Amino acid sequence: MEQIKEENNDVPLICEVLQILGAKWSFLVIAELSKGPKRFQQLHRAVGVVRTQSLTDALRHLENNGIVNRVVFPTVPVSVEYSLTEKGHDFKTSLQEMEKWAAKWSQPRA
């Protein structure tokens, strides 16, 4: 299989992708936000297996990499809403293909 490489660099592009999206819980967060914008608590309930701090870390990581948009509303208390950026939405097709692959090859759960 041919490796796709960045111009002027020997590091395959997939490594860059995995650095951004390979962080723990990133796929779960992207999948949930692909359904629409959510406030933090809505997102936390939807991805119930994730600890609060881990979700915060994942959201910050995705925001810093241009995948997630964070909007703060000046209410009391402050409300924060998360949504996918154009870059994040563009990943949905890949995520759907990964889900198809997982469905085809996953082992039955005991």
Image: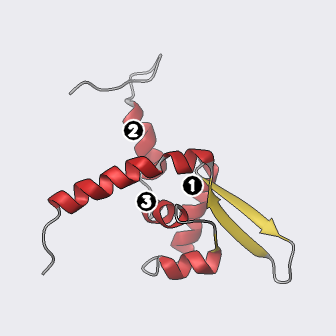
Q: Position of residue 74 (x, y in %)?
A: 87, 72
Which quadrant, please, contains the C terminus? bottom left
Residue at image location 81% in from the left, 77% down from the top: 78
The three-letter code of the residue at mark 3 reads Phe
Q: Which mark is residue 15?
A: 2
Which quadrant, please, contains the N terminus? top left
The three-letter code of the residue at mark 1 reads Leu
Q: Quick check: 19 left or right of 73?
A: left
For mark 1, does the 10 Å Cα neighbourhood hold few (<14), some (14 to 19), or many (20 or more) residues?
Answer: many
Q: Which mark is residue 27?
A: 3
Comes first in the chain, label 3 or label 1: 3
Q: Is residue 96 visible?
A: yes
For mark 2, does the 10 Å Cα neighbourhood hold few (<14), some (14 to 19), or many (20 or more) residues?
Answer: few
Q: Quick check: 63 left or right of 23?
A: right
- 27 is higher (above) or lower (below) than 6: below
Q: Quadrant of residue 14?
A: top left
C-alpha gap between disc 3 and disc 1: 10 Å
Q: Position of residue 76 (x, y in %)?
A: 86, 83
Q: Residue furthest top?
A: 8
For mark 3, does the 10 Å Cα neighbourhood hold few (<14), some (14 to 19), or many (20 or more) residues?
Answer: some
Count of marks overlaid on the render: 3
The three-letter code of the residue at mark 2 reads Cys
Q: Which mark is residue 62?
A: 1
Q: Quick check: 27 left or right of 52?
A: left
Residue at image location 82% in from the left, 83% down from the top: 77
